[in-house]
Amino acid sequence: MSQGRRSPHDRRELIDLLEVHLMGEEPTLSGAEIAAEVGIPYAEARTRWRSLGFTEVDPDEPAFTHRDLEALRLTQQLVELGVVDEEDQSALVRTMGRSFARLAEWQMGLLGRVVDV
């Protein structure tokens, strides 16, 4: 291995650390737990996540963080306050999803450069 290059094991470790850093914590909550905490049906929560561009995961798989819980809680509050109706909600979530996708692409570019050191 040339000097300055990371071994595959070191890269995986680095990626895991960066992922936790970017997400704020390791995923510990399932989609079912988050939906129940917010007080909405899991199917509704799943629809919002799909609109944001998340892949579908098993309802009981710990794939979400407390930040995800807070985001779902905030969108639900907007609905309950009448700030957004169902049509506006879909447009809002899709727009947020596109913005987050661009941010994720940028972060992955940075991550790629760091890991490839």
Image: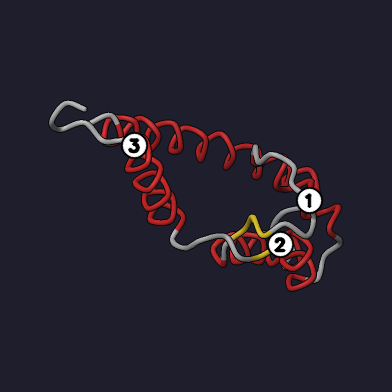
Image spot of residue 84 (x, y percent): 72, 54
Note whether 71 is above or below 13 in the view shown.
below
Which residue is nearer to you in this view: 109 or 83? 109
Report the amino acid beneath label 3.
Leu
Total marks drawn?
3
Q: Secondary structure at mark 3?
A: helix
Tell me whether circle 3 and circle 1 mark residues in contact (CB < 8 Å).
Answer: no
The amino acid type of the residue labelled 1 equals Asp
| Label 1: few (<14), some (14–19) or many (≥20) C-alpha neighbours in 10 Å | few
Q: CA distance from mark 3 to mark 2?
A: 26 Å
The tag on residue 111 is 3
Quick check: 5 left or right of 106? left
- Sequence-first tag of 3 and 1: 1
Left or right of 65 in this view: 40: right
The residue carrying mark 2 is 30
Task: Identify the residue at horizontal 40%, vertical 42% (top origin).
Answer: 12
Residue at 63% in and 65% down: 69
Q: Earlier in the sequence, mark 3 or mark 2?
A: 2
Give the side of residue 9 with respect to residue 64, left or right: left
Distance (Cα) linking label 3 and label 1: 27 Å
The amino acid type found where label 2 is placed reads Ser
Kindly identify which residue carries mark 1. 58
Callout 1 secondary element:
loop
Between 58 and 46, which is closer to the camera in this rendering? 58
Residue 114: % across, % down: 26, 36
* Mark 2 vs mark 1, CA separation in Å: 8 Å
